[in-house]
Image (cartoon, coloured by chain):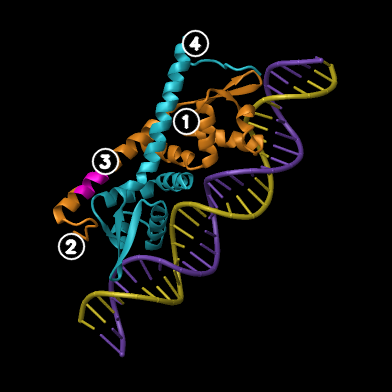
Chain colours: A orange, B cyan, C yellow, D purple
Amino acid sequence: MVDNSLNHVFRALADPTRRAMLDSLAAGETTVGRLSKPFSLSLAAVSKHLGVLERAGLVTREARGRERVCRINPAALEDAQVWLDIHDRFWTDRLDALQAEIGKPPAPLGESH
Amino acid sequence: MVDNSLNHVFRALADPTRRAMLDSLAAGETTVGRLSKPFSLSLAAVSKHLGVLERAGLVTREARGRERVCRINPAALEDAQVWLDIHDRFWTDRLDALQAEIGKPPAPLGESH
DNA sequence: TTTATATTCAACCGAATGGTTGATAATAGT
DNA sequence: ACTATTATCAACCATTCGGTTGAATATAAA
């Protein structure tokens, strides 16, 4: 579950257009049409991108009349943040430990074969 | 540059096999062959994944004899972390402000049309 | 009711992904 | 000198991705 969520969130964030859309949405909720204006893309393409963001849980779309109101959902970033925090901390600690153990920066192979 | 780096890092992290490889590497540097063992994948596939991770700056490969020693590079996570931190904080603040301004959770559309 | 607007759907396209296999290169071991 | 091991390369394959266009759907406006 968490794993799959990570897949979707990281994948969604890997596209600069989608990150730009998130930035736009950070300025406040808006509709698909207005969201599409800064990008020289078809409405259908924007809708698809929104689908990806929605599937990742980063954005919600709600029908309001003939428009769809898009909102950002910061909570969905948490999984990714947690993953990065844990791993960065862990890796850094690991490397620090190795370096301390050995005494020189890019520690060579440690295990046997 | 930063943008492109984000593309590569997020894209690299979007694959569970690659995340698992990073986890393996967190236990210490190792060779391509040993890294490939837990995964039921061809060596070539593993090598390709390593290429993606390397291009994202998350991993380095260094020739040592006929083997390649793979190491993790935690620093490459920073761009992604910074992006997530900034945006999560910003978005959350934004939403908090909106909610405070309006008085109810899922604030409706604010601008004119 | 007719017409315009907002959005999605469906089908398609080219490029990139994630995987395979077989050949190749380079180093180690005998 | 041969042989085995380690890894990459090259070509291929199916699937997914990001994009387009045109038709369909639903609501608003005339």
Q: Nearer the viewer, residue B3 or B13?
A: B3
Residue A19 x/y as whole percent: 50, 37
Indicate the amino acid at tag 4. Answer: Ile
Tag 4 residue? B102
Residue B41 x/y as whole percent: 37, 57
Name the quadrant containing residue A92. top left
Q: Earlier in the sequence, mark 1 or mark 2?
A: 1
Of badges 1 and 4, the one in the foreground is 4
Specify the label residue A58 is tagged with.
1
Quadrant of the frame with the C terminus of chain B: top right
User: Local crowd at mark 2 within 10 Å, few (<14), some, or many (≥20)?
Assistant: few
Secondary structure found at label 2: loop
Specify the label residue A89 is tagged with.
3
User: Local crowd at mark 4 within 10 Å, few (<14), some, or many (≥20)?
Assistant: few
Indicate the amino acid at tag 3. Answer: Arg
Is the residue A58 above or below the residue A15 in the image? above
Distance, label 1 to label 2, CA atoms, is 45 Å
Distance, label 3 to label 1, CA atoms, is 25 Å
Whether labels 1 and 2 share one chain: yes
Q: Earlier in the sequence, mark 3 or mark 2?
A: 3
Distance, label 1 to label 4, CA atoms, is 22 Å
Distance, label 3 to label 2, CA atoms, is 26 Å
Highlighted magenta segment, given as a residue range: A90-96
Number of numbered markers: 4
Is the residue B35 above or below the residue A44 in the image? below
Whether labels 4 and 3 share one chain: no
Is residue A95 shown in magenta? yes
Label the magenta part by its dominant secondary structure: helix
